[in-house]
Amino acid sequence: MIAAGTAVAQEKVINLYSARHYQTDEALYADFTKQTGIKINRIEAGENELLERVKNEGANSPADVFITVDAARLAKADELNLFAPVQSKLLDARIPAHLRTKDWLAFSTRARVIVYNKSAVNAADVQNYEDLASPKLKGKVCVRSGSHPYNLSLGAALFEHLGAAKTEAWAKGLVANFARDPKGGDTDQIKAVAAGECGVTLANTYYVARLMRSDKPADKKVMESVGVIWPNQKTSGVHMNISGGGMLKTAPHKEAAVKFLEYLATDKAQAYFADGNNEWPVVAGVKVNNPALDALGKFKADTIHVGTLAKHQAEVQKIYDRALWR
């Protein structure tokens, strides 16, 4: 009886390894514990550090669930053979097929949009990702590193839609249009566009929404100077990336881990992603109460499979290296 009681007690906890660094997720975790009585022990670090830790821990790893942002990073965990397939009718029913693989799942999405300086660039000239390689934009493009997963995943989508040769030509054209060497994050790029340091950039929508929701006068001024384009609305749709996760093969609390993953697909958790961190729910019909997302408006999303995004990463990195997008 003692052994059985201990097993039950152990199931009342999950060990979460998280590379999501958003304070708004605190409410998510607290609500899960309130709903289920399962305590979350959380370790936060960069995804490379966490994956190295899981590898080093081996069969004795206490990690139950790994969550992070971007399909590229989830693919890296998958390549290390760390995930166990999750059998869940609820997850199969609620998460669209193109946003899950047999080993990991998306729980929220973010779009990679074009942000331009309204006084320096004509919106008609930047309607598609391909336009960023046009000679019209010579000296006007600023962007973060080509080795960053956000840009690798965009390249992977282009690779799937356009093929290798056209993706490489696009990357070389983009680099030829750089206003400066890549540096900083997406918010830095948006601010550089607003300041006139460059005319156009790429940014994930939650960075845009964060600036839109800010009460700081400087942030308000930034958003007054820039416009936002949903790219490729007449073709493939805007590139979408994800936050997601999966259960580890060595998870000591598998039942609780599945409950946690299922919780992330509930309407309440999906609303936390949207309202707290300006991401879109993956579950259809979830009510969102986010003025910035509402203001960004409706759009056509690319429905490329997340597994396909992951598959092309290595080839895209080689393309960017050859194009000197460092």
Image (cartoon, rainbow, N blue to C red):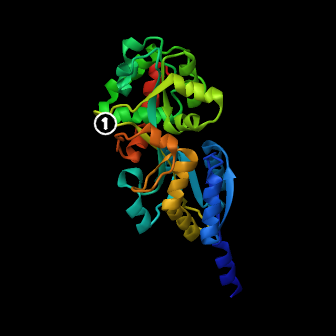
Asked whether the viewer can see residue 246, the reply is no
Quadrant assignment, res 315? top left
Against 58, is 223 above or below?
A: above
Mark 1 crowd level (few <14, some 14–19, many ≥20, 10 Å Cα): some
Q: Which residue is mark 1?
A: 236
* Image location (x, y in percent) of residue 85: 46, 61
For the point 64% across and 43% down, which residue is it? 46
In depth, the one of 152 and 127 nearer the eye is 127
Residue in the foreground of this view, choosing between 163 and 209: 209
Q: Position of residue 152 (x, y in %)?
A: 47, 33
- Does residue 70 appear left or right of residue 251 in this picture? left
Q: Amino acid at mark 1?
A: Ser
Q: Residue at x 39, y 19 (%)?
A: 133
Q: Say if 140 sits above or below 252 in the image.
A: above
Q: Position of residue 18 (x, y in %)?
A: 62, 51
Relative side of 133 to 213, left or right: left
Q: Quadrant of residue 161?
A: top left
Q: Nearer the viewer, residue 209 or 40?
A: 209
- Side of 49 relative to 232 (left or right): right
What residue appears at the point 60 percent right and 64 percent down from the top-left corner?
A: 32
